Image (cartoon, rainbow, N blue to C red):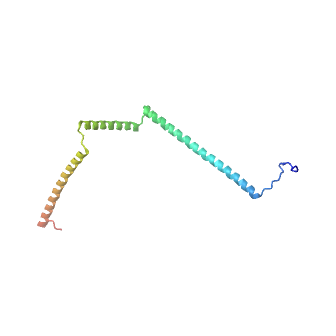
Amino acid sequence: MTDEKPVQISDKTNVGLPLRNLIGLASAVAVGTWAWFGTMERLNQHDMRLTLMKAVVDANSEWSEQLQRGEISTASSQEMFLLLEHTAQQLDALEKSITEGNAVSTNKQQELTLNFLSGRVDSLEGKIEALRDKYAEMKANGNGAH
């Protein structure tokens, strides 16, 4: 064990490494480097997207808060508030008619509709019967033959 020489490494040291292993090692390093930079690029892209989305959300939130506080107003928001006010008035009127007992129930509405339609059907049946009688009379007199 005392015969061992100390290892000396210099720029002229030869390494016995097959070319196949050297190419495989270089390829592995190249693929690893490519994968690392590809991953970093994707992370940067996602970070940029998140930053842009946050900016849009913050701007939208600020606009929404200003709209709620009444600092800004748009034509569509004014229209929305008018429609809301109109709907509230209609709801108040319906609640008042319900509490006073003047509200028409769904069954009553259906009954009125059926009575109206029944009267229309009876009227139309009478008119059809009259037309049939006139057609039969014309045919009997010879005026309706084709």
Horizontal and vertical percent position of residue 94: 28, 38
Q: Nearer the viewer, residue 34 or 136?
A: 34
Along the horizontal axis of the image, is 19 left or right of 31?
A: right
Residue 120 location in percent, x, y? Answer: 19, 52
Figure disc tally = 0
The picture places residue 64, in percent across and down from the top left corner, at 45, 36
Please tell me whether residue 11 is drawn above or below residue 77 in the rendered image.
Answer: below
Residue at the front extreme? 1
Residue drawn 67% across and 52% down? Answer: 31
Q: Classify residue 70 as left or right of residue 93.
A: right
- Indicate left or right for 92 with 124 as reference: right
Looking at the image, which residue is at 33% across and 38% down? Answer: 87
Residue positioned most to the left: 141
**Quadrant the C terminus occupies:** bottom left
Q: Pick the residue in front: 5 or 53.
A: 5
Residue 145 occupies quadrant: bottom left
Tell me which corner region of the image, top left, top right, bottom left or bottom right, holds residue 96: top left
Q: In the image, is residue 59 above or below residue 141?
A: above
Q: Position of residue 128 (x, y in %)?
A: 17, 58
